[in-house]
Amino acid sequence: MDYEPLRRGVAEFIGTFTLIFIGAGTILTTTKLFGAAFAQGAGDTASGLSLVAIAFAHGLAIAVMVSAVGHISGGHFNPAITFGFLITRRIAPSLAVVYWVTQFAAAAIASLLLRWLFPTAIRNLANLGTPALGRGVTQWQGLVIEIVLTFFLVWVVFATAADPGGTFKSIAGLAIGLTITLDIFMGGPLTGAAMNPARAFGPQLVQNDWTKAWIWYAGPVIGATIAALGYEFLYLRPVRPVVPVGPPESGVIEPRPGEASVT
């Protein structure tokens, strides 16, 4: 993996830009396509089709970009994921700052471009893709939903991309993208299922809508913290006794050069 901050920062910028441009852009596009259906009373069908499109747009954007540049930057594209790597000491603080700056900048620029591309009526109807609480969802319920959904995401990131023994390491992008997709299927109508402070920040900034904005920052950070620390200490830092190398019947694995024996 390339450890140069500039090259890794550019990879994070491109990946985050893609997520916001495609994810929020799909919300705007479906709003434009199904606006007439909503007006004619076919809102349930239109909402269902929109949810499928939005879920897959976000998931595919992440799956593609993690697969494309994950070997360069790790494919975070999410300040909460970067925070999880920071608190488990898997990224240097200075590099984490580079990631955060590029992630938030990419979100803002992508949102500005979307503002320019779509007419005012569509932007206002979709609120530029800004995540919001669904009808009947309280702010505390929204917070818990964002915590749980982000926990799933970061848990999968650690299990596939950070764990050297992860079963799906070679296709981590697909697993991470599918996690985002299934999270949006459940949480999209409830909180927008952002799971990502940058995903919330860009549209909030450009649309100047900060209604209960803290939910989409606190929720992902808390969820990422629980998942990252949990996976790190349960599976990546197990307490193992030092055992001698023995015959096959002892159950001890013969180590490769430079490795310790494990059972």
Image: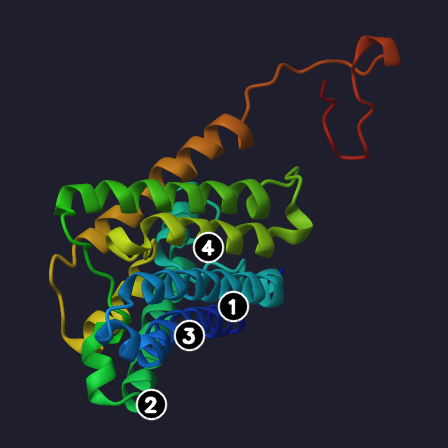
Q: In which quarter of the image is the N terminus?
A: bottom right
Kindly report the distance in space between the C-alpha atoms of the residues bearing marks 4 and 3: 18 Å
Q: In this view, does 228 lie above or below 245?
A: below
Which residue is at 46% across, 70% downward? 9
The one nearer the camera, 107 or 241, is 107
Q: Mark 3 points at which residue?
A: 17
Disc 2, SS: helix
Proximity of marks 3 and 1: CB atoms separated by less than 8 Å: no
Q: Which label sits on residue 30? A: none
The one nearer the camera, 159 or 247, is 159
Residue type of the residue flagged with mark 3: Phe
Kindly report the distance in space between the C-alpha atoms of the residues bearing marks 2 and 3: 15 Å
Query: Residue 72: x, y in percent?
Result: 59, 64
Which residue is at 32% across, 69% downward? 104
Q: Mark 2 points at which residue?
A: 117
Kindly report the distance in space between the C-alpha atoms of the residues bearing marks 3 and 1: 14 Å
Residue type of the residue flagged with mark 1: Arg
Kindly report the distance in space between the C-alpha atoms of the residues bearing marks 2 and 4: 25 Å
Label 3 Cα neighbours within 10 Å, binned few <14 / some 14-19 / many ≥20: many
Query: Residue 226: x, y in percent?
Result: 35, 36
Query: Residue 209: x, y in percent?
Result: 14, 70
